[in-house]
Amino acid sequence: MFGLFGPPKKQEFASILMEKIKAAGGPSDFVYDEASFTLKRKANVVYLGHVHETYCQASKSEREAIILNFARGLQEKSDDVSFDEVRP
């Protein structure tokens, strides 16, 4: 998933994250903005600094879960949900 010398650089991390977002059912049209270290899509901006830092500080065994949890949080939600489906 990344080089022999530790966690991925920012560009590589963004690419990995975009792949995981798509695989988790999220949007596939994010664009990486290197200058701001963000993923952009329409009016949405996803800042990657915190998740990248968390990922880099995590143990190798925790890294995949960090990326998957973040990617799952960006899954597209359907607006066609009834009140009965979301009622506690």
Image: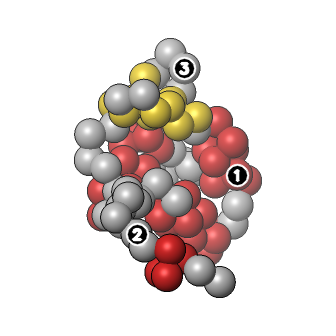
Residue 1 seen:
no
When the figure is inspected, residue 54 is found, relative to residue 29, above or below; the finding is below
Q: Secondary structure at mark 2?
A: loop
Instruction: Measure the C-alpha gap from mark 1 to mark 2.
Output: 33 Å
Q: Earlier in the sequence, mark 1 or mark 2?
A: 1
Q: Amino acid at mark 2?
A: Val
Locate the N terminus by quadrant: bottom left
What's the mark number on residue 36? Answer: 3
Image marks 3 and 1: residues in contact by CB distance under 8 Å: no
Whichever of callouts 3 and 1 sits on the residue coming sooner in the sequence is: 3
Residue, disc 1: 54
Say which element carries label 1. Answer: helix
Tell which of 25 and 7 is nearer to you.
25
Looking at the rendered structure, the kind of residue marked 3 is: Ser
Residue identifier under label 2: 81
Location of residue 58 in the rendering, given as x and y in whole percent from the top left corner = 70, 61
The residue that appears at 53% across and 37% down in the rendered structure is 46
Residue at 47%, 44% (x, y): give it: 13
Front label number (3 vs 2): 2
Q: Of helix, strand and loop, which one carries label 3?
A: loop
Disc 3/disc 1 C-alpha distance (Å)? 18 Å
* Residue displayed at 65% across by 83% down: 88
The residue depicted at 60 percent of the width and 63 percent of the height is 66
Name the residue type under label 1: Thr
Quarter holding residue 33: top left
Most distant residue in the left direction: 28
Q: Is label 1 or label 2 in front? A: 2
